[in-house]
Image: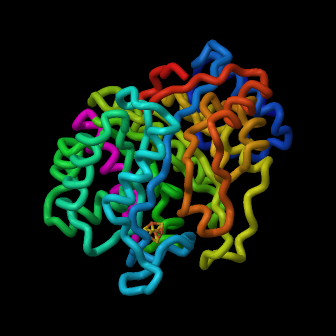
Amino acid sequence: MIDDIAEKIGDGERLSLEDGLRLFSHPNVSELGMLADQVRWEKHPSARVTFNIGRNINYTNVCWVRCKFCSFYRPPGHEEGYTLPDNEIFQKIENLISVGGDTPDSCEILMQGGLNPHLKLDYYEHLFSEISVRYPAVYIHSLSVAEIVYIAHLSKVSIEETLVRLRAAGLQSLPGAGAEILDDEVREQIADRKETTDEWLDVHRTAHRIGMNSTATMMFGSTETIEHRIRHLLSVRDLQDEAHQNTNGHFTAFIAWSFQPEGTELEGVRKATGYDYLRTVAISRLFLDNIKNVQASYVTQGPKIAQIALRYGINDFGSTMMEENVISAGGVSFVMRTDEIQRLISDAGFEPQRRNTRYESVDA
Ligand code: SF4
């Protein structure tokens, strides 16, 4: 029975770790969906489901970190390692603009790559400046915490200086990539060379302090326990409280996606089921009372589960992506056209609304 928790939610009270443990063990997933849907309508009292036109650009796959859950990277010196030439990056952006139009800031690029020892701060400053000058339609929502920390380390400057300089060059917001599970015990098991939980939180804290928005993610279904997932949500919620009290930047959205074991060192891990995904997104919506937008992850779940998730607390369908290499290196990825996203949203009984990365409406 979760009547007391439902009452707390109805009264706008915050959920605790114990509430989370009970919700995760509650067998009736539809009931969790109904609670999450109720909160979704309180935060977004209209049938609009938003989506963005954007693309990933995986500019380099060279990476020395060797995360156990990753099949995308190639170690430095490997014959399959690449760094895209600028012209190829510009070509990808032009393809995006041909789909998304040239209204300023209407097309999102999510540049994400490995930790490449040859790419220092000046590489990114030059690239982002070029993109900003050439393509005003593009909103640069790029680089994971691991990349920021490594760029700062390689370039011998602080995290704050790195972010300030990247912002001056054109970086507008930070994606939540690399959060995996914000617990050092789990990080030690799946990505022992990557930043710690505190480092991940601190990069986002710094971004918020300088007035830059970011998103938060959670990759679940690897080696973590349910308690780890809830602690992750609590860490994100606490940082958002801090952001709302002290800074101009904050998390604009939360995205949960499930670990894809194919081709990774953790191939023996059994994939999260559809119900596990729906339960996790519904509970995320219930816990994250201070984050307005919760995005579907159709890249890992496929369009059908993402569509159902619209009744489990999700109000946003994410971005068109156009290509995706990090997750698809493991053999699993769904990339969708705009009209297909619109069809899925309409068919679920909602109204598709294009947005930009700031969650402002963009005319289709
Ligand atoms: S997840 Fe990122 S940091 Fe880890 S190995 Fe893959 S590319 Fe490198």
Q: Quadrant of the N terminus?
A: top right
Query: Which residue is rendered at x = 41% and y = 63% of the image?
Result: 113
Q: Is residue 221 magenta?
A: no
Query: Which residue is rendered at x = 60% and y = 47% of the image?
Result: 256
Query: Which residue is rendered at x = 35% and y = 42% of the image?
Result: 140
Residue 3 or residue 308, whichever sits in front: 308
Instruction: Please tell me in which quarter of the rendered image ligand 1 is found.
Output: bottom left
- Tell whether 304 sits left or right of 121: right
Span colored in magenta: 193-211
Q: List x then y, in percent, for residue 143.
A: 36, 53
Q: List x then y, in percent, for residue 120.
A: 21, 65
- Tell whether 184 sits left or right of 26: left
Q: Quadrant of the C terminus?
A: top right
Residue 256 or residue 166, whichever sits in front: 166
Q: List x then y, in percent, for residue 151.
A: 25, 63
Label total for image: 0
Q: Is residue 202 magenta?
A: yes
Task: Characterize the magenta stretch by its predominant secondary structure.
Answer: helix
Residue 187 or residue 136, whichever sits in front: 136
Q: Residue 123: tell me if it is visible.
A: yes
Q: List x then y, in percent, for residue 269.
A: 71, 71
Q: Residue 242: tell me if it is visible.
A: no
Identify whether 103 is placed above or below 90: above
Query: Which residue is rendered at x = 48% and y = 39% of the image?
Result: 98
Identify whether 136 is placed above or below 346: below
- Tell whether 229 sits left or right of 247: right
Residue 132: name its quadrant.
Answer: top left
